[in-house]
Amino acid sequence: QVQLVESGGGLVQAGGSLTLSCAASGRIFSVNQMDWYRQAPGKQREWVSGFTKDGAAMYTDSVKGRFTISRDNAKNTVNLQMNSLKSEDTAVYYCHAYSFWGQGTQVTVSS
């Protein structure tokens, strides 16, 4: 069993920044297995960022150059630094690992 708890969402103006954190507990073998998804109102959940098996960061095209994913292996934590936020980044952001999901954290970007 794996538990994922997100934090750090909120309301920010366009162009601003937020940092999301996901703390994992339970049987996490590698934080490289943790990634971020988001779901905007009326849209399907989409993958945002994660790691390759070798630990390299990966991003969906729409956030490249603006978002940075990082991990703390000792703390089983993955962060998502989001800069230059746009209104289209508004969504509930979910942490995901294996077949488990966090409860989500709301990010709202006002234009």
Image (cartoon, rainbow, N blue to C red):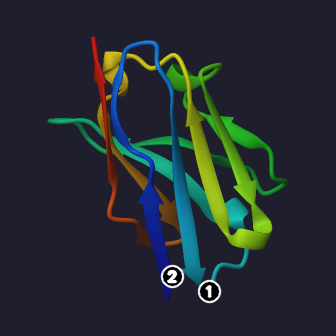
User: The C terminus appears in which quarter of the rendering?
Assistant: top left
Residue beneath disc 2: 2
Residue at 40%, 67% in the rendered image = 101
Q: Secondary structure at mark 1?
A: loop
- Could you say where residue 34 lies in the image, as x and y percent from the top left? 60, 61
In terms of image quadrants, where is residue 11?
A: top left
* Amino acid identity at mark 1: Arg
Q: Quadrant of residue 91?
A: top left
**Mark 1 touches mark 2? (CB < 8 Å):** yes
Q: Position of residue 66 (x, y in %)?
A: 59, 21
Frontmost residue, 5 versus 62: 5
CA–CA distance in space, label 1 to label 2: 6 Å
Q: Which residue is mark 1?
A: 27
Q: Is residue 91 above or below residue 24?
A: above
User: Is 87 displayed left or right of 24 in the figure?
Assistant: left
Where 34 falls versus 98 (above or below)?
A: above
Mark 1 vs mark 2: which is more N-terminal? 2
Residue in front for this viewpoint, 58 or 92: 92
Q: Amino acid at mark 2?
A: Val
Percent position (x, y) of residue 107?
33, 37
